[in-house]
Image (spheres, rainbow, N blue to C red):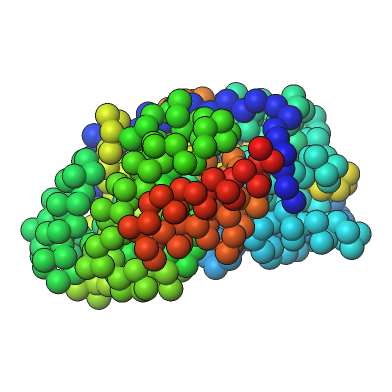
Amino acid sequence: MRIRGRSRTTTYAWVALAATSVLALGACGDGDDGGDGGGTPGVPPSGQAQPGGSPGVELPSLSGEKVEVAAVWTGPEQENFTKVLKEFEKRTGAKVTFVPAQDPIVTFLGTKVAGGQPPDVALLPQVGALVSAVQNKWAQPVGPEAQAQLDKNYSKGWKDLGAVGGTQYGVYYKAANKSLVWYNTKAFEAAGAKVPKTWPEFIATADTLSASGVPAVSVAGADGWTLTDWFENVYLSQSGPDMYDKLAKHQIKWTDPSVGEALRTLASLFGRKDFLAGGQTGALATEFPKSVTQTFTGGDQPAAAMVFEGDFVAVNIAQTEAKIGEDAKVFPFPAVGAKAPVVSGGDVAVALKPSKGAQALLTFLASPDAAEIQAREGGFLSPNKSVRPEAYPNDIQREIAKSLIAAGDDFRFDMSDQAPASFGGTPGAGEWKVLQDFLKNPSDVAGTQARLEAEAAKAFGN
């Protein structure tokens, strides 16, 4: 579905995540595993009262009601979210069914709506998808109970992202810091590599690793969304937040010199076959989960020494024998310009049916009760400021969560997720496809810019 504009102005600001704090947390040990579902010290089991006798969020009885929830999550992410849904069932008596969705989710939901069978609630991974759902009159405004939880637990910036035309439609249940580089400590130690702070240092570290016989980076080129994240981090750091906002809204063209500069910076990494696990061909055949797991298997001779992506990488590391804080550590995306970038993303829950069950689930997802269940499993970050740090399973994830909450309204949202889905959220099309072609041939900067602009103009309608 083409989105021809925004019905409101969304506030996007700069995330200030201090490099020193993340480098410090990268050296931290894994305080407690917590990934086995056994709970975290100091955090009550799900369904029990909060410390001090607070009963948690109040939910209605939904005995006999059926609630369907759709999201694009798979694997461990889906499994961990299912634990949240099970708790909702326990508290309300409802029967909840998880419906796996496909990208682009707007197309998937459109088919369901046309068939008269929309899910009660959908979790949308793009701002543009929320706007489209509202414009198509699929979405229901949040009810007073969910709004009360939002007002209590969320900053204005996260509430604004879930609103369209001044009306609250969504609850941002899951957030992400998409400006982290995770690294295999054994591979670094074996190569004598140092943690970089700037892009030139990053390329020098890649050279050191490559010379040791281990490719520097595992790139998930088969999933185009990871390539948009690479571009956005480079662009935000190199050109700054004002230019980032303009490009996100297509107020400047993708043929702008600033875009070419960012692509040439990326080409200094993507253009080196020895830097990439499997070279460009291997990267284009690598999906995101594999990009992580192959970085943390093989001892000091993994398929690659580093993998770039958000805090949610921890979910996939948990599928290996690597221990976060020991075998797997993290550092901020290197500064290309004056400041290291931090790009945030998130999944927003929206009701697609005017049902009691849908509103009750939104209320639950807006509460710390729900978020703390999934936080304990790892690989999850909540924008809910009432979630206690001790709910997270290790020091690294606690510090990442604290940094997000401390930023308040001071953050920038993922650029491709702000765009119409046909440009920024469709596999094999738009920005995803053009950047995959660029990974295959990083020397074609001008051609890449021209194709990006053609796709953006078509999607934005200008």
The residue under the point 25% across, 75% down is 298
Whether residue 210 is situated above or below residue 182 in the rendered picture: below
Can I make out residue 179 in this image? Answer: no
**Rendered location of residue 168, percent (x, y):** 74, 31
The residue under the point 80% across, 40% down is 135
Can I make out residue 338 in this image? Answer: yes
Whether residue 373 is situated above or below residue 18 in the rendered picture: below
Can you name the residue that lies furthest to the right here? 116
Seen in the image, is 115 located left or right of residue 316?
right
Quadrant position of residue 343: top left
**Rendered location of residue 226, percent (x, y):** 45, 56
Seen in the image, is 35 located left or right of residue 458?
left
The residue under the point 52% across, 52% down is 451
Seen in the image, is 161 located left or right of residue 258?
right
Tally of marks: 0
Q: In which quadrant is the C terminus drawn?
A: top right
Quadrant position of residue 208: bottom left
**Rendered location of residue 166, percent (x, y):** 74, 24
Q: Which of the two residues, 462 or 59, is positioned nearer the viewer here?
A: 462
Q: Which of the two residues, 453 or 195, is positioned nearer the viewer here?
A: 453
**Rendered location of residue 71, percent (x, y):** 67, 57
Quadrant position of residue 275: bottom left
The residue under the point 36% across, 73% down is 282
Whether residue 194 is situated above or below residue 49 in the rendered picture: below
Seen in the image, is 131 located left or right of residue 403?
right
